Amino acid sequence: MNDPLYRKLMRQIHGLAARCVLRLVNDGLKMQAVQVGLLDGETGDNMERFQNYGHTSVPLPGAEGVALFLGADRAHGVIIAMDDRRYRLGGLAGGEVALYSIDDQEPAGHRIVLKRGGVIEVRGDIIDLRAATRLHLSAPEVEIHADTRREMDVAGYGEALNFEDGVWRTDTYTTGANFAPAVEHGIQPPEVD
């Protein structure tokens, strides 16, 4: 059709959404802002990146996304989705969900996976669980495995079990003082309610 109004309308419809490539992220705002590269060398600057409530991330330059231009106004774009094929965790079974980062590429992995069959897999180099009031573990079976060290303390008074040169050594201690190896100092196991 040769109608100028029709051609303008079609250009606006075609310009409502576009693929984009991330260049910069400003995570210091209430709503994360990004700079992206669009088609034909166009730059989208200070575009708000909408994320799902309860989850936030800072993708790396080169991540790909979908930009929407509200009211077909190229000056008012928002990013509604962003992914990075270079780091995406693959190989999940249908229905599984994962939280991962760039560090998942390391040999130990770095992820939380809600797997089929009620299994939750947590991997990382260091996993630090902290609770302000109580950390409660409860199950019919609890297994704790360590290759070289296991340590427990209450207010700095505790016990360390170390495996060195093929020998297990038990040290009991208070904060700032170590007692002789393999000498028990009356530490009782914790009470479980």
Image: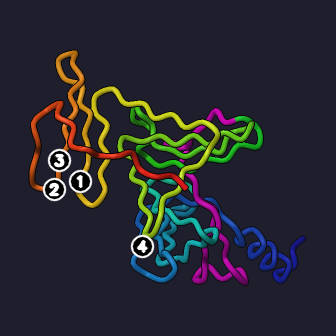
- The Cα–Cα distance between marks 2 and 4, rounded to whole angstroms, is 40 Å
- The Cα–Cα distance between marks 4 and 1, rounded to whole angstroms, is 41 Å
Residue farthest along the right direction in this orientation:
1
Give the x, y percent position of residue 66: 64, 62
- Marks 1/3 in contact by CB < 8 Å: the verdict is yes
What sort of colour scheme is used for the picture? Answer: rainbow
Please tell me whether residue 49 is drawn above or below residue 156 in the rendered image: below
Give the x, y percent position of residue 43: 49, 70
Q: Residue 14 occupies which quadrant of the picture?
A: bottom right
Mark 3 sits on what residue?
A: 173
The magenta-colored residue range is 65-92
What type is the residue that disc 3 sits on?
Tyr
- Marks 1/2 in contact by CB < 8 Å: the verdict is yes
Q: Secondary structure at mark 4?
A: loop
Closer to the N terminus: mark 1 or mark 2?
Answer: 1
Camera-nearest label, 4 or 3: 3
The circle drawn on residue 157 is: 1
Mark 2 sits on what residue?
A: 175
